[in-house]
Image: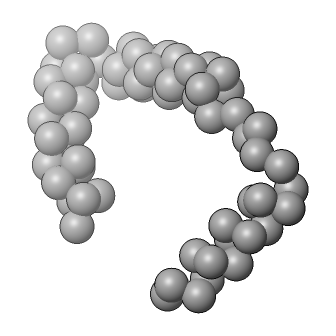
C-alpha cells in the first residue's frame, strides 16, 4: 500500500521533470538522488552487531511471524 502512495507522490514530480528538463536530464537527477541515498546508507546502516546476537534476533523474528 505504501508503494502506491509513494508512486502517487513521485509520478507528478517526475512528469514535471520531463517537461522542464527532458527525459535524459530527469533520469540523471533521479540517479544522483539514488547515489546520494546509497552513500548515506553506507555510513549509517553499519552492521556492528555480534553474530550470535544477530542470530538470536533473527530467530526471535521468525517465531513472531
Instruction: Say whether residue 24 is visible.
Output: no
At 76% from the left edge and 46% from the top edge, which residue is drawn? 49
Total labels drawn:
0
Q: Position of residue 24 (x, y in %)?
A: 42, 20
At 27% from the left edge and 11% from the top edge, which residue is drawn? 21
Front residue of 19/32: it is 32
Q: Position of residue 11 (x, y in %)?
A: 20, 41
Left or right position of 12 against 7: left
Instruction: Say whether residue 3 is visible.
Output: yes
Q: Position of residue 57 (x, y in %)?
A: 67, 67
In the rendered view, would you say 38 is above or below 50?
A: above
In the rendered view, would you say 42 is above or below 50?
A: above
In the rendered view, would you say 44 is above or below 2?
A: above
Q: Position of residue 18 (x, y in %)?
A: 24, 24
Q: Quadrant of the N terminus?
A: bottom left
At 17% from the left edge and 54% from the top edge, which residue is drawn? 5
At 60% from the left edge and 26% from the top edge, which residue is drawn? 44
Front residue of 35/18: it is 35
Q: Residue furthest right?
A: 51
Amino acid at each position: 500500500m505504501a508503494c502506491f502512495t509513494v508512486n502517487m507522490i513521485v509520478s507528478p514530480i517526475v512528469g514535471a521533470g520531463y517537461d522542464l528538463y527532458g527525459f535524459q536530464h530527469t533520469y540523471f537527477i533521479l540517479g544522483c538522488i539514488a547515489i546520494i541515498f546509497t552513500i548515506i546508507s553506507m555510513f549509517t546502516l553499519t552492521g556492528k552487531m555480534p553474530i550470535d546476537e544477530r542470530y538470536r534476533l533473527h530467530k526471535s523474528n521468525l517465531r513472531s511471524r
